[in-house]
Image (cartoon, rainbow, N blue to C red):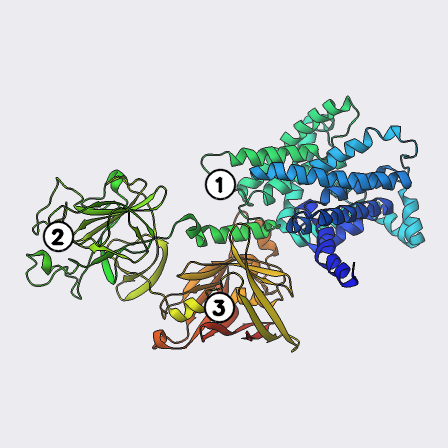
Amino acid sequence: MPIHRIVNLFRNVVLPATLNSYSVIFFFNNRLLACVIMLVSFFNFFAGLSGLLAVLVTVLIANAMGFDKIQLKNGVYSFNALLTGIGMGTFFDPGLVFFTLLVLAALMTLILSVTFGGWLYKYGLPFLSIPFVITFWFIVLPSSQFENLGLTQRNIYWMNEMYAIGGNPMLNFFQTMDTLPVHKMVDIYLRSMSSIFFQDNLIAGLFIAIALLICSRIAFSLSVIGFVSAYFFAKFTGSAAASITYYNIGANYMMVAIAIGGFFIIPSKYSYLWTVLLVPLTSLVLLFMSKLLGFIHLPVFSLPFSLVVILFVYFLMLRIKPTKLILTPIQYYSPESNLYTYNNNKNRLSNFLYFPLYLPFWGEWKVMQGHNGKHTHKGDWGQAFDFILVDDESKTYASNGLFCENYHCYNKPVVAPADGLVEEIIDNVDDNEIGKINTINNWGNTIVIRHLPGLYTQMSHLRKGSFKVAKGDFVKRGDLLANCGNSGRSPEPHLHFQVQGTPVLGSRTIDYPFSYYHEKDKAERQLKQFSRPREGALISGVTTNTLLKTAFDIIPNTILKYSYRNERGIEKVEIWESYTDAYNYKYLYCKETGSSAYYVNDGSMFYFTAFYGSRKSLLYFFYLSAYKVFLGDPENDEMIDGMPLNVIQDKRISVWFHDFIAPFYSYIRVWHSIKPEDTNNLLDAEMLILKSKVRVSVLGRIRNESESTIIVNKNCIMKFTYESIKTKIRAKCINS
């Protein structure tokens, strides 16, 4: 293999996969935590070496066999091999037989990881450390049959290894640290932390605890809660009954707390409460399995942790109605990121829950009657709207209003709110005289359109003979359907609109929002997103700005190339390529930094949904600058959108204390705002300038985090700038 291919393999696959194998044990993809755990594993040098070799063997085999690169680089396939290698290096002496068994054990963990992963992932479940436990059983149980594989005595004389590595200075340091006069509970906590990697070492536990604290305040607090729950439950029941040992506390109780409290479940007071409840339950499972497996002389290791977590996650997945205990929808390998992103996206990305429906008319209409109206729209038919047209004097008609033709909305076009198939048309009802109603043909002339299975829209009181489509036709959003009339139960011309679950005329209504529209209250006009119009409001549809729509229409296989000067004044170039992943989500990928930014363009709005990678990359600064861009006709008002707290880079804003209490209360908020610099004649201009800001509120005090300028010219994003306290970026498109 050529040298450059070996270098690329090491840099792009082996290195990230190896490091993540260490940190993913605590459910992180964090290099600091990985390096600390790797260092700690080498406190027992041969155990650390065995673990590293097992990981390398697993990664190389998995890569050669062509398994999923993302899972491989995240350490998912190899962390069980790491635990197996450390365990084998802890209990057995080195030798040819040992290394042969180590390679076989690494291969077995890979096979089990892939197999269990393929089986459990179908149900959205993890396999955790089950491959490690099973593989170690296959090594431990027949080990007495291998005459050339001997149990080690190094754990008894571990001081000798410290002396061999660093002489008297290292030996004295470890002896001093291991005998620090700390509180008994602190001592047990730290030794329990180290026992996850088969050690009984105060300094090892201290290193891991500090690294965990730096990486995640939530995970650290959960480890403490898991420990305290186990400790006091053991005191309550008696240590023997609770099976309380350093390893059991660390590998079972603490890991259950971290997994349930902050990884598989969005951190909250409810996840913390369930953590306290599940630790005693885990102790019962552990005691039962210890007794059961004791008959065949097998240790339980971390099997209780794996079973309790898998069963509880599956238990939550079977709920018919969601509760306050929320399963993590998108995994960011950080409790803080999971929490902040979920809290931000549960409102921001609510449109993912809806098929977009637009207003069924052109121009500005008034909501005469909304949901649960004064006159109709009652009970099962309460989620409907009646629309009318008014003049500057708020009158619905001209002249004397005695005839249908006097009313502003009469004979006006009614258009398709979205793409769909015409399911039903009623076109045989005459218009009423003003003030009279037809209760026999209640809905009057009507059209029903199927947009999705179980999603239909009905528009009623239309004018007889005005239909431009027929039953069975496929219509596109904005296509002319018919004209507004006064048929059915309609004392004056108006348009009735409702969403329903069946094609049957007059079905029960569904509470369903319109995707994007403008709403005017007095003189103020606001953009509404996936909302329901307020009764009495003047509303109008959005129109697309061609310049913005073309510039942000980043289709898959598009390549964007930008030059910029970094903070040191060095000229650099980044190339972004647009791809679509296996779930049909679009993202920009920067090969130079390995960063990805996921985005959505629904024709009316461009917005980013997630970012992964280097926060020094140009792509990250573009993610902050163009976090959300309205593609319709520009307005003077700012469009404001929430951002997850973990985007903050200003070190003056300390989020450490906030992280500790964030599952219970949040006092820091982050917003992104954007507005055109000048809206004069923008619809005809060839250039458009957008100004965006990221602002932070701490206990109600607001300050700017960053400011950006986006220049759209010649149907592309020609330039953008980003400025914060420490960063100034000027980027220019150099696409040829």
Q: Residue at x 56, y 50 (%)?
A: 338
Q: CA distance from mark 1 to mark 2?
A: 47 Å
Which residue does the numbered mark 1 point to in the structure image?
A: 324
Q: Residues within 10 Å of mark 1 (few under 14, many from 20)?
A: few
- Is 532 situated above or below 716? above
Q: Say what secondary structure mark 2 lies in.
A: loop
Residue 101 image offset from top left, x and y in percent? 84, 38
Which residue does the numbered mark 3 point to in the structure image?
A: 693
Mark 3 vs 2: CB contact within 8 A:
no
Q: CA distance from mark 3 to mark 2?
A: 48 Å
Sequence-wise first label, 3 or 1: 1
Please name whichever residue, 33 or 683, is drawn nearer the observer in this view of the structure.
Answer: 683
Question: In the drawing, does residue 57 fall left or right of residue 703?
Answer: right
In this rendering, the count of numbered labels is 3
Sequence-wise first label, 3 or 2: 2
Please name whichever residue, 456 or 225, is drawn nearer the observer in this view of the structure.
Answer: 456
Question: In the drawing, does residue 604 fall left or right of residue 364?
Answer: right
Please name whichever residue, 475 or 666, is drawn nearer the observer in this view of the structure.
Answer: 475
Quadrant where the N terminus lies?
bottom right
Q: Is residue 18 in view?
A: yes
Mark 3 vs 1: CB contact within 8 A:
no
Q: Nearer the viewer, mark 1 or mark 2?
A: 2
What kind of residue is marked 1? Lys
Q: Say what secondary structure mark 3 lies in.
A: strand
Which residue does the numbered mark 2 point to in the structure image?
A: 492
Please name whichever residue, 43 or 390, is drawn nearer the observer in this view of the structure.
Answer: 390
Q: Say what secondary structure mark 1 lies in.
A: loop
Q: Residues within 10 Å of mark 3 (few under 14, many from 20)?
A: many
What kind of residue is marked 3? Lys
Mark 1 vs 2: CB contact within 8 A:
no
